[in-house]
Each structure stands twice: as C-alpha cells, then as structure tokens.
Amino acid sequence: MFDFLKDEKDRPTPTLPEGTVRRHYSIEGQVQGVGFRYRACYAAQSLGLTGWVENEDDGSVSLEVQGGPALFPKLFALIQRSDYIHITSIRPRDMTPDPWERGFRVRGY
C-alpha cells in the first residue's frame, strides 16, 4: 500500500542513460567567495547534470558531476563566465555513476 516507504534496495535500480559518467573534480584558484558554487549549480541544472559542489577548508572547491561527458566542458565554460572566478587547476577523478541521484545541489552552506 505504501510503496514509497520501501528501502532503495527493495526497488529496482533506475537505468541511467547510455554513456552516463560521474566525475569528481578538485578545483583550485580564486574559487571561494566569488559565487563559484552557485554559478556551478545554476550551470549544471541548466545542462541537466546532477551532482554537488562544496567549498573545502584548503580554499579549493570539490565538484562532483554526473551526466553526458560532452556536457562537462560546457559546464566549466559557463562557470568561468565571470570576472571573479579564476581557475588555476582542475584535477579530475572518474567515479561510479549513482543511479539514484536526482538534481544538483550546493553542499556546506
């Protein structure tokens, strides 16, 4: 009667679109205090990507994004359309896609 109360393990795993990739990025430069996270969130949502973005204690930003890999360069192009954001280093790491993820969010307000 209340199917929405079932655990995820009791439901069939959602199917991801063919070619879906998940990637974690460590981003350095002038990326904190300049609206980076909110610009990243808006850009990812406009491209239909999922994931999250978060400031790190060392002044860098972590961004985890999932979707079609051809959209990732577009994401960074949209983020860098700012006079205040200056990325000096991007370190990517491939991850296993998350079929349960929905939306893109800013973490660590």
Image: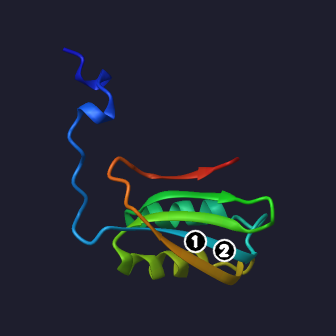
Extreme residue in the top direction: 1
Q: Is residue 14 left or right of residue 95?
A: left
Q: Nearer the viewer, residue 88 or 99?
A: 99
Q: Quadrant of the N terminus?
A: top left
Q: Residue at x 53, y 82 (%)?
A: 77
Whether residues under marks 1 and 2 lie with C-beta atoms below 8 angstroms apart, the answer is yes
- Vertical placement of residue 107 versus 46, above or below: above
Q: Position of residue 12 (x, y in %)?
A: 20, 40
Q: Secondary structure at mark 2?
A: strand
Q: Residue at x 76, y 66 (%)?
A: 32
State which quadrant residue 57 falls in. Answer: bottom right
Q: Nearer the viewer, residue 18 or 82?
A: 18
Q: Position of residue 46 (x, y in %)?
A: 43, 64
- Vertical placement of residue 66 versus 109, above or below: below
Q: Position of residue 100 (x, y in %)?
A: 35, 47
The local crowd at label 1, few if under 14, some if 14 to 19, many if 20 or more residues have their Cα within 10 Å, is: some
Mark pair 1, 2: CA separation: 6 Å
Residue that carries the numbered disc 1 in the rendered image: 25
Q: Position of residue 58 (x, y in %)?
A: 81, 65
- The amino acid type found where label 1 is placed reads Tyr
State which quadrant residue 40 falls in. Answer: bottom right
Residue that carries the numbered disc 2 in the rendered image: 27
Q: Residue at x 48, y 57 (%)?
A: 51
Q: Residue at x 74, y 60 (%)?
A: 56
Q: Nearer the viewer, residue 79 or 27?
A: 27
- The amino acid type found where label 2 is placed reads Ile
Q: Secondary structure at mark 1?
A: strand
Extreme residue in the bottom direction: 88
Q: Which mark is residue 85?
A: none
The local crowd at label 2, few if under 14, some if 14 to 19, many if 20 or more residues have their Cα within 10 Å, is: many
